[in-house]
Protein backbone atom coordinates (compact mmCIF):
# COMPACT_ATOMS: atom_id res chain seq x y z
CA UNK A 1 0.00 0.00 0.00
CA UNK A 2 1.10 3.53 -0.83
CA UNK A 3 -0.57 6.69 0.50
CA UNK A 4 -0.46 10.09 -1.16
CA UNK A 5 -2.22 13.33 -2.04
CA UNK A 6 -2.97 15.32 -5.21
CA UNK A 7 -1.05 18.04 -7.01
CA UNK A 8 -0.28 20.69 -4.40
CA UNK A 9 2.13 20.62 -1.47
CA UNK A 10 1.15 23.29 1.04
CA UNK A 11 4.38 23.05 3.03
CA UNK A 12 6.71 24.07 0.22
CA UNK A 13 7.01 27.60 -1.13
CA UNK A 14 6.41 26.65 -4.76
CA UNK A 15 3.71 25.35 -7.09
CA UNK A 16 3.90 22.92 -10.00
CA UNK A 17 0.59 24.36 -11.28
CA UNK A 18 1.71 27.85 -12.29
CA UNK A 19 -0.11 29.15 -15.34
CA UNK A 20 -1.05 32.43 -17.02
CA UNK A 21 -3.91 33.96 -18.98
CA UNK A 22 -4.48 32.81 -22.54
CA UNK A 23 -4.20 36.42 -23.69
CA UNK A 24 -0.66 36.49 -22.24
CA UNK A 25 0.53 33.43 -24.17
CA UNK A 26 4.01 33.55 -25.67
CA UNK A 27 6.51 30.77 -26.17
CA UNK A 28 8.90 32.53 -23.81
CA UNK A 29 6.20 32.69 -21.12
CA UNK A 30 5.38 29.02 -21.70
CA UNK A 31 9.01 27.87 -21.39
CA UNK A 32 9.61 29.94 -18.24
CA UNK A 33 6.44 28.63 -16.58
CA UNK A 34 7.09 24.97 -17.43
CA UNK A 35 10.65 25.28 -16.12
CA UNK A 36 9.30 26.58 -12.82
CA UNK A 37 6.59 23.91 -12.64
CA UNK A 38 8.97 21.03 -13.27
CA UNK A 39 11.53 22.37 -10.79
CA UNK A 40 8.82 22.56 -8.15
CA UNK A 41 7.57 19.08 -9.03
CA UNK A 42 11.04 17.72 -8.30
CA UNK A 43 10.97 19.40 -4.88
CA UNK A 44 7.52 17.96 -4.14
CA UNK A 45 8.62 14.46 -5.10
CA UNK A 46 11.70 14.78 -2.88
CA UNK A 47 9.52 15.95 0.02
CA UNK A 48 7.19 12.99 -0.50
CA UNK A 49 10.04 10.48 -0.48
CA UNK A 50 11.46 12.07 2.67
CA UNK A 51 8.08 11.63 4.40
CA UNK A 52 7.13 8.19 3.09
CA UNK A 53 4.39 9.36 0.73
CA UNK A 54 4.81 7.23 -2.38
CA UNK A 55 1.63 8.02 -4.30
CA UNK A 56 1.19 11.38 -6.05
CA UNK A 57 -1.14 12.93 -8.58
CA UNK A 58 0.55 15.28 -11.02
CA UNK A 59 -1.06 18.62 -11.79
CA UNK A 60 -2.89 18.96 -15.10
CA UNK A 61 -1.23 22.38 -15.44
CA UNK A 62 2.39 21.26 -15.68
CA UNK A 63 2.37 22.57 -19.27
CA UNK A 64 -0.13 25.43 -19.59
CA UNK A 65 -2.39 25.30 -22.67
CA UNK A 66 -0.69 22.09 -23.80
CA UNK A 67 -3.89 20.81 -25.46
CA UNK A 68 -5.01 24.23 -26.73
CA UNK A 69 -4.63 25.10 -30.40
CA UNK A 70 -2.65 28.22 -29.48
CA UNK A 71 0.25 26.09 -28.28
CA UNK A 72 2.29 25.10 -31.34
CA UNK A 73 5.60 24.87 -29.48
CA UNK A 74 7.38 21.50 -29.32
CA UNK A 75 7.60 21.50 -25.53
CA UNK A 76 7.94 17.71 -25.57
CA UNK A 77 11.32 17.96 -27.24
CA UNK A 78 12.43 21.03 -25.28
CA UNK A 79 11.79 19.36 -21.89
CA UNK A 80 12.46 15.75 -22.90
CA UNK A 81 15.54 15.36 -20.72
CA UNK A 82 13.89 17.02 -17.70
CA UNK A 83 10.87 14.71 -17.94
CA UNK A 84 13.15 11.70 -18.30
CA UNK A 85 15.09 12.69 -15.18
CA UNK A 86 11.86 13.17 -13.23
CA UNK A 87 10.70 9.77 -14.40
CA UNK A 88 13.97 8.18 -13.33
CA UNK A 89 13.58 9.69 -9.84
CA UNK A 90 10.01 8.40 -9.68
CA UNK A 91 11.02 4.89 -10.72
CA UNK A 92 14.13 4.76 -8.54
CA UNK A 93 12.03 5.64 -5.50
CA UNK A 94 9.08 3.39 -6.40
CA UNK A 95 6.58 6.27 -6.47
CA UNK A 96 3.15 5.64 -8.03
CA UNK A 97 1.87 8.44 -10.27
CA UNK A 98 -1.55 9.39 -11.59
CA UNK A 99 -3.17 12.31 -13.39
CA UNK A 100 -6.79 13.45 -13.25
CA UNK A 101 -7.96 15.70 -16.10
CA UNK A 102 -10.42 18.43 -15.19
CA UNK A 103 -14.19 18.10 -15.36
CA UNK A 104 -14.32 19.44 -18.94
CA UNK A 105 -12.95 16.08 -20.15
CA UNK A 106 -16.18 14.28 -21.07
CA UNK A 107 -15.85 11.45 -23.57
CA UNK A 108 -19.58 10.78 -23.88
CA UNK A 109 -20.63 14.36 -24.60
CA UNK A 110 -23.09 14.72 -27.49
CA UNK A 111 -20.98 17.69 -28.63
CA UNK A 112 -18.22 16.69 -31.05
CA UNK A 113 -16.07 19.65 -30.07
CA UNK A 114 -16.17 18.66 -26.41
CA UNK A 115 -15.13 15.10 -27.30
CA UNK A 116 -12.27 16.37 -29.52
CA UNK A 117 -11.02 18.71 -26.79
CA UNK A 118 -11.31 15.92 -24.21
CA UNK A 119 -9.21 13.57 -26.32
CA UNK A 120 -6.60 16.27 -26.90
CA UNK A 121 -6.31 16.79 -23.14
CA UNK A 122 -5.96 13.05 -22.52
CA UNK A 123 -3.27 12.81 -25.21
CA UNK A 124 -1.36 15.69 -23.56
CA UNK A 125 -1.54 14.20 -20.07
CA UNK A 126 -0.69 10.73 -21.29
CA UNK A 127 2.34 12.16 -23.09
CA UNK A 128 3.62 13.54 -19.76
CA UNK A 129 3.67 10.00 -18.36
CA UNK A 130 5.18 8.67 -21.58
CA UNK A 131 7.93 11.30 -21.54
CA UNK A 132 8.73 10.25 -17.98
CA UNK A 133 9.02 6.68 -19.35
CA UNK A 134 6.59 5.38 -16.71
CA UNK A 135 4.86 2.06 -17.27
CA UNK A 136 1.08 1.67 -17.56
CA UNK A 137 0.58 1.42 -13.79
CA UNK A 138 0.70 5.25 -13.99
CA UNK A 139 -2.90 6.12 -14.79
CA UNK A 140 -5.18 8.77 -16.28
CA UNK A 141 -8.32 9.04 -14.18
CA UNK A 142 -11.64 10.35 -15.54
CA UNK A 143 -15.32 10.25 -14.65
CA UNK A 144 -18.02 8.55 -16.70
CA UNK A 145 -19.41 11.88 -17.85
CA UNK A 146 -23.04 12.89 -18.17
CA UNK A 147 -26.21 10.83 -18.42
CA UNK A 148 -27.93 13.29 -20.77
CA UNK A 149 -31.35 11.90 -19.89
CA UNK A 150 -30.44 8.44 -21.21
CA UNK A 151 -27.64 6.82 -19.25
CA UNK A 152 -27.56 3.52 -21.20
CA UNK A 153 -27.03 5.47 -24.44
CA UNK A 154 -24.40 7.67 -22.74
CA UNK A 155 -22.52 4.57 -21.60
CA UNK A 156 -22.60 3.13 -25.11
CA UNK A 157 -21.41 6.45 -26.52
CA UNK A 158 -18.46 6.45 -24.09
CA UNK A 159 -17.52 2.94 -25.25
CA UNK A 160 -17.77 3.92 -28.91
CA UNK A 161 -15.48 6.91 -28.43
CA UNK A 162 -13.08 4.74 -26.44
CA UNK A 163 -12.80 2.12 -29.16
CA UNK A 164 -12.86 4.33 -32.27
CA UNK A 165 -11.18 7.60 -31.29
CA UNK A 166 -8.71 7.13 -28.43
CA UNK A 167 -5.05 6.38 -29.21
CA UNK A 168 -3.74 3.10 -27.79
CA UNK A 169 -1.29 5.00 -25.58
CA UNK A 170 -4.22 6.71 -23.85
CA UNK A 171 -6.32 3.56 -23.59
CA UNK A 172 -3.43 1.78 -21.87
CA UNK A 173 -3.54 4.33 -19.03
CA UNK A 174 -7.21 5.26 -18.81
CA UNK A 175 -9.41 4.31 -15.88
CA UNK A 176 -12.85 5.45 -14.72
CA UNK A 177 -13.91 6.64 -11.27
CA UNK A 178 -17.33 6.29 -9.66
CA UNK A 179 -18.70 9.75 -8.96
CA UNK A 180 -21.00 11.25 -6.33
CA UNK A 181 -23.95 12.09 -8.58
CA UNK A 182 -24.33 10.06 -11.76
CA UNK A 183 -22.02 7.09 -12.29
CA UNK A 184 -22.14 4.55 -9.48
CA UNK A 185 -19.78 1.63 -9.09
CA UNK A 186 -22.27 -0.53 -11.03
CA UNK A 187 -22.35 2.00 -13.89
CA UNK A 188 -18.54 1.99 -13.96
CA UNK A 189 -18.63 -1.81 -14.09
CA UNK A 190 -20.65 -1.53 -17.28
CA UNK A 191 -17.98 0.75 -18.73
CA UNK A 192 -15.31 -1.71 -17.63
CA UNK A 193 -17.11 -4.58 -19.35
CA UNK A 194 -17.40 -2.56 -22.57
CA UNK A 195 -13.83 -1.22 -22.61
CA UNK A 196 -11.61 -3.16 -20.21
CA UNK A 197 -10.78 0.03 -18.28
CA UNK A 198 -10.07 -0.56 -14.59
CA UNK A 199 -12.19 1.27 -12.02
CA UNK A 200 -10.64 3.76 -9.61
CA UNK A 201 -12.75 3.43 -6.48
CA UNK A 202 -13.81 6.49 -4.48
CA UNK A 203 -15.12 5.55 -1.02
CA UNK A 204 -16.76 8.92 -0.40
CA UNK A 205 -18.53 8.94 -3.76
CA UNK A 206 -19.71 5.38 -3.04
CA UNK A 207 -21.21 6.60 0.22
CA UNK A 208 -23.09 9.28 -1.77
CA UNK A 209 -24.27 7.07 -4.68
CA UNK A 210 -24.39 3.28 -4.53
CA UNK A 211 -26.50 0.20 -5.13
CA UNK A 212 -26.35 -1.08 -1.59
CA UNK A 213 -22.90 -2.68 -1.74
CA UNK A 214 -21.06 -2.80 1.62
CA UNK A 215 -17.75 -0.93 1.51
CA UNK A 216 -15.51 -4.00 1.60
CA UNK A 217 -17.49 -5.66 -1.19
CA UNK A 218 -17.32 -2.46 -3.26
CA UNK A 219 -13.52 -2.23 -2.88
CA UNK A 220 -13.16 -5.89 -3.87
CA UNK A 221 -15.38 -5.35 -6.91
CA UNK A 222 -13.30 -2.41 -8.13
CA UNK A 223 -10.02 -4.19 -7.37
CA UNK A 224 -11.04 -7.14 -9.55
CA UNK A 225 -11.04 -4.86 -12.62
CA UNK A 226 -7.27 -4.24 -12.30
CA UNK A 227 -4.80 -6.51 -14.06
CA UNK A 228 -1.67 -6.52 -11.86
CA UNK A 229 0.80 -7.00 -14.73
CA UNK A 230 -0.69 -4.12 -16.75
CA UNK A 231 -2.43 -1.84 -14.28
CA UNK A 232 -0.81 -2.53 -10.92
CA UNK A 233 -2.96 -2.81 -7.81
CA UNK A 234 -6.16 -0.85 -7.23
CA UNK A 235 -5.87 2.92 -7.03
CA UNK A 236 -8.54 4.55 -4.90
CA UNK A 237 -9.50 8.00 -3.67
CA UNK A 238 -10.31 8.46 0.01
CA UNK A 239 -12.20 11.23 1.77
CA UNK A 240 -15.14 11.78 4.10
CA UNK A 241 -18.01 14.21 4.57
CA UNK A 242 -17.27 17.71 5.83
CA UNK A 243 -19.29 18.11 9.03
CA UNK A 244 -22.21 20.54 8.69
CA UNK A 245 -21.64 21.09 4.95
CA UNK A 246 -23.65 20.05 1.88
CA UNK A 247 -23.67 16.37 1.05
CA UNK A 248 -20.60 15.47 -1.00
CA UNK A 249 -18.31 18.24 0.31
CA UNK A 250 -14.88 16.85 1.21
CA UNK A 251 -13.55 17.26 4.71
CA UNK A 252 -10.82 19.83 5.33
CA UNK A 253 -8.70 17.51 7.45
CA UNK A 254 -8.68 13.75 7.89
CA UNK A 255 -10.87 12.18 10.57
CA UNK A 256 -8.38 9.65 11.83
CA UNK A 257 -10.96 7.37 13.45
CA UNK A 258 -12.96 7.17 10.21
CA UNK A 259 -9.79 6.35 8.30
CA UNK A 260 -8.90 3.73 10.91
CA UNK A 261 -12.37 2.20 10.48
CA UNK A 262 -11.95 2.10 6.69
CA UNK A 263 -8.56 0.47 7.08
CA UNK A 264 -10.06 -2.13 9.41
CA UNK A 265 -12.96 -2.82 7.04
CA UNK A 266 -10.59 -3.40 4.12
CA UNK A 267 -8.01 -5.42 6.05
CA UNK A 268 -6.11 -7.73 3.70
CA UNK A 269 -7.05 -5.88 0.50
CA UNK A 270 -4.23 -4.35 -1.57
CA UNK A 271 -4.67 -0.76 -2.74
CA UNK A 272 -2.88 2.56 -3.15
CA UNK A 273 -4.78 5.42 -1.50
CA UNK A 274 -5.01 9.00 -2.75
CA UNK A 275 -6.33 11.32 -0.04
CA UNK A 276 -8.68 13.90 -1.55
CA UNK A 277 -8.60 16.03 1.56
CA UNK A 278 -8.03 19.77 1.54
CA UNK A 279 -4.98 20.00 3.76
CA UNK A 280 -3.09 17.65 1.43
CA UNK A 281 0.23 16.36 2.79
CA UNK A 282 -0.70 17.11 6.41
CA UNK A 283 -3.57 14.61 6.32
CA UNK A 284 -1.53 12.20 4.21
CA UNK A 285 1.13 12.06 6.92
CA UNK A 286 -1.52 11.40 9.57
CA UNK A 287 -3.06 8.64 7.43
CA UNK A 288 0.39 7.13 7.03
CA UNK A 289 0.78 6.86 10.79
CA UNK A 290 -2.65 5.23 11.19
CA UNK A 291 -1.85 2.69 8.47
CA UNK A 292 1.57 1.95 9.98
CA UNK A 293 0.07 1.42 13.44
CA UNK A 294 -2.37 -1.07 11.94
CA UNK A 295 0.36 -2.99 10.14
CA UNK A 296 -0.92 -2.02 6.70
CA UNK A 297 2.41 -0.56 5.59
CA UNK A 298 5.95 -1.83 5.53
CA UNK A 299 7.89 0.34 7.94
Image: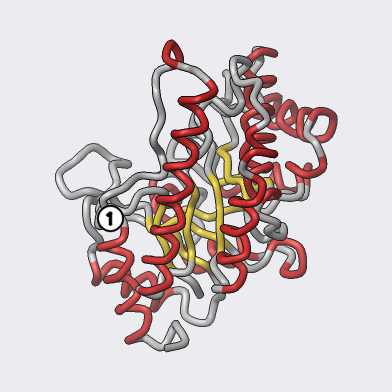
For the C terminus, which image quadrant? bottom left
Q: Residue at x 43, y 47 (%)?
A: 205
Which x, y percent locates residue 125? 61, 40
Choose between 34 and 276: the one closer to the eye.
34
Residue 58 horizontal/vertical position (percent): 49, 49
Task: Classify residue 77 by image quadrant.
Answer: top right
Residue extending farthest right: 164
Is 280 located above or below residue 168 in the figure? below
Residue that label 1 marks: 12
Colour scheme used in the picture? secondary structure
Q: Is residue 89 above or below residue 207?
A: below
Near-viewer residue (216 or 39): 39
Question: Residue 35: percent from the left, percent from the top?
Answer: 48, 41
> Residue 19: percent from the left, percent from the top?
41, 29
Q: Is residue 225 visible?
A: no
Q: Residue at x 77, y 50 (%)?
A: 196
Quadrant in the rendering for residue 138: bottom right
Answer left or right for 241 relative to 232. Answer: left
In this picture, residue 283 sits left or right of residue 199: left
Q: Is residue 153 left or right of residue 292?
A: right
Amino acid sequence: MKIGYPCINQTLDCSSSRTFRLASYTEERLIETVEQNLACLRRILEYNVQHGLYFFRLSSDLVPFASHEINKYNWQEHFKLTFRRLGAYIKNNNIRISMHPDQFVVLNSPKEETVRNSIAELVYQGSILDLMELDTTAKLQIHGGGAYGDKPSAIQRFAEVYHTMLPDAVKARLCVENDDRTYSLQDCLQLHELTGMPIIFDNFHHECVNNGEPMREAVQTAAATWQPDRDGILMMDYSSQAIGERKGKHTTSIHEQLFHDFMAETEGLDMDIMLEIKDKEESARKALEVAKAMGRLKV
